[in-house]
Amino acid sequence: MPIRSLFIANRGEIAVRIIRAARELGIETIQAYSDADADSLAVQIADRSVNVGRPHATKSYLNIEGMVEAARQSGADAVHPGYGFLAENPDFADAVAAAGMVFVGPDGNTIRMMGDKVSARQAAIRAGVPVVPGSEGRIEDPSKARALAEEIGFPVMIKAAAGGGGRGIRIAASMEEFEQALPQARAEAQAAFGDGGLYIEKVIGQARHIEVQVLGDGTDVVHCFERECSLQRRRQKVWEEAPSASLTQDIRDSLCDSAVALARAVNYSGAGTVEYLYDDQTGDYYFIEMNTRIQVEHPATEWITGIDLVAEMLRIADGQPLRLAQDDVICHGHAIEVRLNAEDPANGFMPFPGVVGDLRLPGGPGVRFDSMLYSGYAIPPFYDSLLGKLIVWADTREAAIIRLDSALSELEIAGVKTTKPLFRALAADDAVRSGAVHTKWLEGWLEDNATNLT
């Protein structure tokens, strides 16, 4: 059955993005919204909208039963989960399918397998993809955990098997720290994810974070090249680039081919991202996880390939075979995306909800701004602080950084503090301009520079 109407089980800028892609495909859009989002841009531009509950996410966007029932009663043919909230919840995918609707993404079994870091690691090993040295499965016995940590060598990383988004991670530099961190990590994982399972990995010092965008239809898979996401704060990405300037062509080919091999091995359907740590001193790379959804940073890949990833997700969910052969996917130029959050970077990145005053968005060739903002919009305090994403493209990385700084200088969001000063400072930094960064670099830089970000 073709998809004629689409229920969007998310909010904010990704909901707006999905609405726009669906509209171009002639698909009716039905926007879910909480009481706090009744005046959101997504509600205003969707064909229809449905209230799904109270402001707190557990009463609305995270309520599987309520969300599925709302979608069913709306008459939707399909449900797009966006990212965050229920996007990687296998029970939600199963419930959507059981209600007779299409889930836009992989099925529940694939989400379940790749969402559990241990089973995803095992799938990568079976596919011949390099993994970080660590436990082969979940660590249940503390004595075996201690023995493995000694064998791997400190520092080690204790990670929640069901974790994601940089959460549920503890690093131990010694056995004493390991003994303290293990029960804390188990309790934290149980509280955050409802699953106290843990596994252990070797810490790769000063690694880069590289991720490969894949598209699959359950049989065939192609990659859309890679993004580098090494500029992170508290393991959360803030600045992403496509492609990575740190890879040689041989390593790029090998890394992207390995991502395709893994996605093909699990019969992947939809858009997904295979994430790696990359040691640019040795040229070694290691699989760390797979995100079974569209990523926040997907527009950077769309710039360099010209592929509308959200539209392709919808076509695949509609039962159409993958339209692209690998030779059709061509990388051109360089793209950078930065995440504009309602936070005060000079004050510990304190959240800063408020009412948007005058709004001036940047424009010109190679400039894109994905957001849900408009003048007079009251930013709800109940959700994450992402306001929008500024994405620029140019022929070279150097030109893209110049264009980014120019676009940031035009951008004005009155009434709230944002992370704009952080990105202007980073665009001017010599290490960022030369690409001499790693996943821990920004944390150190902020210790010296955060108070100046006004």
Image (cartoon, rainbow, N blue to C red):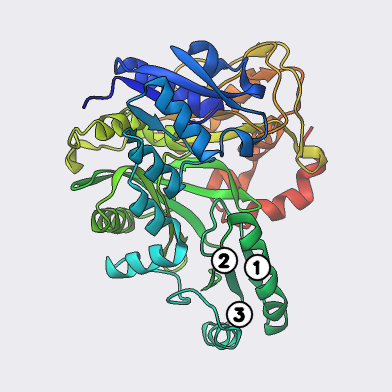
Could you tell me how far apart the alpha carbons at marks 3 and 1 are, in whole angstroms?
Answer: 17 Å
Q: Give the left or right position of residue 6, taking residue 140 as reference.
A: left
Amino acid marked by disc 2: Lys
Q: Which percent across, then down, holds residue 421?
A: 71, 32
Q: Residues within 10 Å of mark 3 (few under 14, many from 20)?
A: some
* Residue 257, x across and y down, in percent: 26, 55
Which image quadrant is residue 425 in? Answer: top right
Q: Which residue is mark 3?
A: 154
Mark 3 element type: loop
Q: CA distance from mark 2 to mark 3?
A: 15 Å
Report the side of 236 relative to 5 (left or right): right
Q: Residue at x 66, y 28 (%)?
A: 54
Q: Relative to 54, does residue 119 appear above or below in the rendering?
A: below
Q: Which residue corresponds to mark 1?
A: 185
The front one of 9 and 136 is 9
User: Counting residues from the N terminus, which is met first, the one under dot 2 or under dot 1?
Assistant: 2
Image point (57%, 66%), residue name = 159
Residue 50 is situated, as x and y percent measured from the top left of the image, at 51, 20
The residue positioned 71% from the left and 77% from the top of the image is: 177
* Mark 2–mark 1 CB contact (< 8 Å): yes
In the rendering, which numbered label is found on residue 159?
2
Image quadrant containing the C terminus: top right
CB under 8 Å between callouts 2 and 3? no
